[in-house]
């Protein structure tokens, strides 16, 4: 009927009524009503209701309710509730609750609680809690045989100690997050437990150096694979790591400013962390490193770190020198690196990183830019030539950069070193690249450069290393090459140069190696060059196309003769 009957029907309707009945039906409906009943049904619903019942059901639901029941169920739920029950369950939960129970459970939980119970349990817990009980237990816990520790334990016996541990736990929770702290294998959790239980300083959460000590101890556990590995020097485990001074050992009871590789300012804030070539391992760098806000130097080169560079590194606003080279770092350069306006040196060379170069990372203080031997690609950002005019050393070799070489190099008039070898650059060698009167090293080998060499090259009289090998340069080699009087290494092999080898090369008294092989050069090696090799015991390598039945170059003083192009 369109309007519900005032009396219950003897046989239930096969379809739900548009309005609820004012009296309970004799037989429960097999479909849920649109509005919940205000009186419990004699038997539980066959399907779950959209809104929870305000009265207890005779049998427990097989699915968890979205809102906890106001009275205890006769049997425990097989699924954990989203909000803890306000009444004790008859059987303990198989999973920890998000908040402690307000009433004692009949049996102890088999899982750790995140906050301690306010009442003693009837039996000891199977696992240790993060913080001690406030009351005596009815049965003593069975401890393992005693062991000798370097630092005495601080078993809490007072409310003050209990509060100290609770405060430290909550502080670490705010810094690192619930998921990280609840993971018993995380470096953050290990650092937390060390500070709460084993640290001889016994800091409080409001101690001035609490965050710093927590951050640097997290870094230690992260770079030892959770203490499974050992540093070469001054690691926490004295049986696996030597240390000239025991007070300098990491995780010692001394102030962290006394630990090896750490330097602090007058406020006991860490400014330097230098752990080069010290056996550091680990697959990630903890974000807590970003809490060391006074850090100026981070030196971690020549280790075995295989992490990504965390975006939190952009929080280190005072960082000037970042050495992450010669590790196994992966991933991209985080965009947050652009926040480091005080950066003087950025070195991530010899890793396995990829991606493009963030344009915002170039600031006026940047002088050294080293990203060689990675998998970076794309083109060089224009900001490199407009925002970082004080660049001295640039090493981008061994990547997959492409396009032509930017004429913007002409703006870098202080540049001393430019390595861009082993990339995919094409086109000519721009004359602007020689604008800096201080240029000492130029390596453009292993690209696809072509055309003739610019005349400006021969005016770069500060050059000591010139490597243009394995390109497609053409034309002759100018006699003005003799003006490069500081030249030590000259590598022009594997190109298409023609003509003869200039005799003026004999004027380069500092030369130690010269390779002219695999070109179309001909004639005889100039006598001045051979004399130079005889006079100088440093001139060890002289290579040309002087081999074969009809050698292109006649050379009696060459250390190596190649057949050259057929």
Image (cartoon, helix red, strand yellow):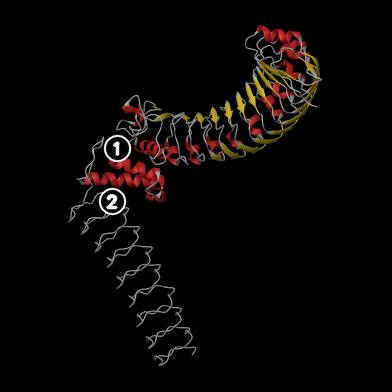
37 or 112: nearer the viewer: 112
Residue 462 image-quadrant placement: top right
Percent across and percent down for residue 340 are 52, 33
Task: Please name the residue shown 64% across and 18% down the image.
Answer: 440
Q: In this view, does 476 lie above or below 116?
A: above
Residue 150 image-quadrant placement: top left
- Dot 1 falls on a residue whose secondary structure is loop
Residue 231 image-quadrant placement: top left
Left or right side of 267 for 506: right
Q: Name the residue under label 2.
A: 129
- Distance from Cα at disc 2 to Cα at disc 1: 18 Å
Q: Can residue 506 be seen in this view?
A: no
22 or 446: nearer the viewer: 446
> Which residue sits furthest front?
549
Q: Which quadrant is home to the C terminus?
A: top right
Task: Please name the residue shown 39% across and 87% down the image.
Answer: 27
Give me the disc on residue 199: 1
248 or 326: nearer the viewer: 326
Percent across and percent down for residue 104 are 24, 61
Q: In this view, does 373 lie above or below 537?
A: below
Q: Are marks 2 and 1 in contact (CB under 8 Å)?
A: no
Percent across and percent down for residue 81 are 37, 64
Characterize the local packing of mark 2: few (<14), some (14-19) or many (20 or more) Cα atoms within 10 angstroms.
Answer: some
Tag 1 or tag 2, which sits nearer the N-term? 2
- Dot 2 falls on a residue whose secondary structure is loop
């Amino acid at each position: 009927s369109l309007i519900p009957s005032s009396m219950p029907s003897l046989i239930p309707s096969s379809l739900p009524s548009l309005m609820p009945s004012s009296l309970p039906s004799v037989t429960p409906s097999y479909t849920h009503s649109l509005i919940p009943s205000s009186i419990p049904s004699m038997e539980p619903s066959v399907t779950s209701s959209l809104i929870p019942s305000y009265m207890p059901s005779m049998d427990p639901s097989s699915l968890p309710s979205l809102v906890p029941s106001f009275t205890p169920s006769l049997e425990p739920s097989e699924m954990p509730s989203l909000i803890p029950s306000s009444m004790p369950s008859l059987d303990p939960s198989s999973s920890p609750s998000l908040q402690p129970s307000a009433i004692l459970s009949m049996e102890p939980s088999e899982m750790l609680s995140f906050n301690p119970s306010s009442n003693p349990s009837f039996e000891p817990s199977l696992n240790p809690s993060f913080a001690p009980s406030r009351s005596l237990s009815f049965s003593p816990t069975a401890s393992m045989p005693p062991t000798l520790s370097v630092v005495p334990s601080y078993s809490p016996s007072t409310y003050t100690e209990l509060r100290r541990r609770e405060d430290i736990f909550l502080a670490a929770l705010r810094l690192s997050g619930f998921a990280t702290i609840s993971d018993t294998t995380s470096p953050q959790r290990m650092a937390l437990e060390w500070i709460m239980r084993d640290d001889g300083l016994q800091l409080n959460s409001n101690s001035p150096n609490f965050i710093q000590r927590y951050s640097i101890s997290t870094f230690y556990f992260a770079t030892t694979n959770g203490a499974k590995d050992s540093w070469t020097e001054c690691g926490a485990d004295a049986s696996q790591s030597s240390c000239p001074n025991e007070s300098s050992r990491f995780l010692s009871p001394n102030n962290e400013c006394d630990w090896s590789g750490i330097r602090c300012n007058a406020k006991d804030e860490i400014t330097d962390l230098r752990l080069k070539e010290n056996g550091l391992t680990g697959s990630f760098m903890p974000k807590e490193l970003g809490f060391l806000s006074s850090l100026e130097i981070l030196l971690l080169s020549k280790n075995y770190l295989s992490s990504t560079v965390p975006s939190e590194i952009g929080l280190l606003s005072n960082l000037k020198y970042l050495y992450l080279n010669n590790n196994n770092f992966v991933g991209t350069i985080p965009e947050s690196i652009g926040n480091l306006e005080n950066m003087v040196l950025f070195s991530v060379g010899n890793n396995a990183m990829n991606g493009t170069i963030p344009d915002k990372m170039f600031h006026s203080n940047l002088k050294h830019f080293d990203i060689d031997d990675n998998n970076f690609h794309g083109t060089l950002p224009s900001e490199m030539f407009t925002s970082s005019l004080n660049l001295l050393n640039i090493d981008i070799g061994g990547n997959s950069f492409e396009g032509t070489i930017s004429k913007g190099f002409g703006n870098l008039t202080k540049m001393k070193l430019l390595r861009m070898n082993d990339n995919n650059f094409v086109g000519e060698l721009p004359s602007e690249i020689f604008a800096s009167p201080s240029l000492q090293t130029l390596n453009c080998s292993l690209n696809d450069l072509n055309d003739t060499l610019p005349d400006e090259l021969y005016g770069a009289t500060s050059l000591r290393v010139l490597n243009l090998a394995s390109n497609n340069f053409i034309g002759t080699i100018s006699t003005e090459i003799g003006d490069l009087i500081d030249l030590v290494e000259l590598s022009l092999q594997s190109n298409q140069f023609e003509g003869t080898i200039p005799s003026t090369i004999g004027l380069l008294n500092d030369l130690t190696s010269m390779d002219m092989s695999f070109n179309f050069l001909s004639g005889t090696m100039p006598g001045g060059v051979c004399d130079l090799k005889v006079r100088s015991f440093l001139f060890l390598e002289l290579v040309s196309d002087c081999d074969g039945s009809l050698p292109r170059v006649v050379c009696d003083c060459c250390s190596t003769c190649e057949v050259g192009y057929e």
